[in-house]
């Protein structure tokens, strides 16, 4: 039990009557823009990760807290534990 061409044409006419041609045109352009944006994002994502990987490999490693001077108010964690 499949749909014939007549069924599909009737379905298309009902959709056009309900939504109107202007709204269907807007939906089509929005859908096309979303697909284009998705494809561009996928293309940019692969190029960006390759550039970031190359930049990370050549960058010098940084120490955490290297810019802050050590203070004498350090806390010994083991001394604070309860016995």
Image: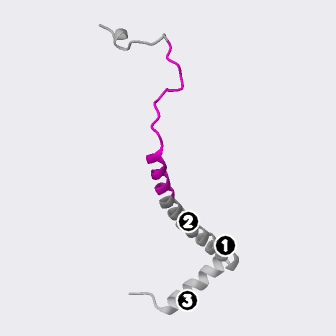
Q: Residue at x 63, y 81 (%)?
A: 16
| 38 falls in the magenta region | no
Q: Quadrant of residue 81?
A: top left
Q: Quadrant of the N terminus?
A: bottom left
Q: CA distance from mark 1 to mark 2?
A: 21 Å
| Residue under pointer 3 | 9
| Residue under pointer 1 | 26
| 65 falls in the magenta region | yes
Whether label 2 touches label 3, CB < 8 Å: no
* Crowd tier of the residue under label 3, counting other residues whose Cα lies within 10 Å: few below 14, some 14–19, many 20 or above: few
Residue 18: mark in rendering: none
* Crowd tier of the residue under label 1, counting other residues whose Cα lies within 10 Å: few below 14, some 14–19, many 20 or above: few
14 and 76: which one is in front? 76
27 and 9: which one is in front? 27
76 and 4: which one is in front? 76
List x then y, in percent, for residue 22: 70, 77
Residue 40: mark in rendering: 2
Q: Residue at x 39, y 12 (%)?
A: 76
Q: Earlier in the sequence, mark 2 or mark 3?
A: 3
Q: Is residue 63 left or right of residue 30?
A: left
């Amino acid at each position: 039990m499949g749909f014939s061409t007549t069924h599909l044409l009737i379905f298309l006419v009902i959709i056009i009557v309900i939504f109107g041609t202007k709204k269907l045109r807007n939906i089509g352009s929005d859908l096309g823009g979303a697909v284009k944006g998705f494809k561009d994002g996928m293309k940019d994502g692969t190029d960006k990760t390759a550039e970031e990987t190359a930049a990370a490999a050549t960058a010098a490693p940084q120490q955490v807290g290297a810019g802050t001077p050590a203070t004498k108010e350090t806390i010994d964690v083991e001394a604070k534990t309860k016995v």
